[in-house]
Amino acid sequence: MDHIVALHLPAVRSLNESGLAAFSAHYLDHLAGRRYAPATAQAYLRCVAHFARWLTRSRLSLDRIDERSVKRFLDEHLPRCACSAPVRRQRHELRAALKQLLRVLATHGALVSREELSPVEEELRRFDEHMRGVRGLALNTREQRVRIVRGFLTDLFGDRLLLIPDIQPVAVRRFVMQRLQRWSAASCNVLAGALRGYLRYRGSCGDQVRTLLGAIPSAAHWRLAQLPEVLTESQLERVLDSFTPGMPSPRRAHAMVRCVVDLGLRASEVVRLGLDDIDWHAGTIRLARNKSRRTDVLPLAAATGHAIAQYLQFERPATTNRAVFVRHVAPRDVPIRAGVVRQALRDAFRRCGIAQTKVHVLRHTLASRLLERGSPLKEIADVLRHRALDTSLVYTKLDMKRLAAVALPWPGSAS
């Protein structure tokens, strides 16, 4: 079998004894189709051989391979692995290799489908369907609320049967108060909103939740009280100049950050940009399926268009993916996530010695720059795509020229 010649003899024996040998050629073809490097493919096959050895010793047949068996291998076997060398032991590498193995087995009908969900996960699935179908909430909001409610229900029930009447008001209050110690007031109000949304959903199912709703505390947080954090012009220039040829994927990172700096895009909007969303002749860019669930058309700034064009011409790999910004490592046909944008920005801040970690600081900076140029508040709200004009009122605190014009002299000062 030519495709496993590069493996060591123990690895070949482990594959043959487990029954996975019949899929090793399919596995390598799968990786090649997703353009993994040959060396990576061989390393992943050695990871599969390690898993195969554990399957044999655990007396697990092919029809017992699923997500749970992979989790057992990683959580139970790997920490105390005493398999003789050579074997691959890096957890992240094994997890990635076995994820691809499950896909190959599923493609060839060898993966038994086990849709058994824990009571908590089944409840979260129904809650997500309610938020999507009844409330019409955006995907990001639903994911955030599901993540919060999962922590709440898991703390209370674990893997046991979920019984809403067993939830006590003190448990609700304790869950929120524990997070108040390490979260900001605004974040805790998001948490409280997620719990209220879930309990109201249970109320619509017939449960008595009035007492539980009353037990959810709210953190003191005055709207528009905080001053938005912004970068100075020199800091912004340093960030934009920090994408040098020596770093990984500099043109992609520079183009993504320019989309945030010049257009005020959110990280989720950057990764959803498609090649068909850019009209180069008209100089516009289309934002579909954004946070406001509408389609917006924005003027494409010359600097942003130039950065995107440089990336498309000289750095973007060949791929079937129609997204503008794509993965540069295998699997290349899978869209990048918003975390790639955030990480590119965090890395730029770190290189420039700026103590910031959030993408939103660039949206605030854009609003501040527009104010300095004399743009009206309505125009700023349109650029940032705020659904309500009140959301943009916080930026009036940054308009020092107009604030100075209406400021009264301090009592007792020379005027």
Image: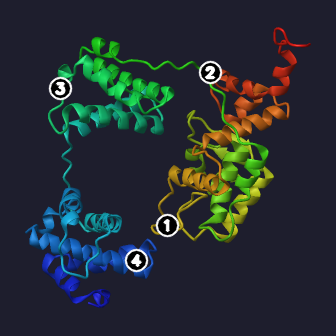
- Quarter of the figure with residue 139: top left
Amino acid type, mark 3: Leu
Q: Secondary structure at mark 1?
A: loop
User: Which residue is label 2 attached to?
Assistant: 225
Query: Reading the chain from its start, which is encountered first: label 4 or label 1?
Result: 4
Q: Is residue 335 above or below residue 193?
A: below
| Left or right: 32 as drawn, with respect to 155 | right
Say which residue label 4 marks. Answer: 40
- Cα separation, mark 3 vs mark 2, equals 40 Å
Q: Are marks 3 and 4 in contact (CB under 8 Å)?
A: no
Q: Residues within 10 Å of mark 3 (few under 14, many from 20)?
A: few
Q: Quadrant of the N terminus?
A: bottom left
The amino acid at mark 4 is Thr
Tell me, what colour scheme is on the image? rainbow
Q: Which residue is mark 1?
A: 332
* Position of 301 relative to 34 (above/below): above
Q: Helix, strand, or loop for circle 3?
A: loop
Is residue 274 something one can see in this rendering?
A: no
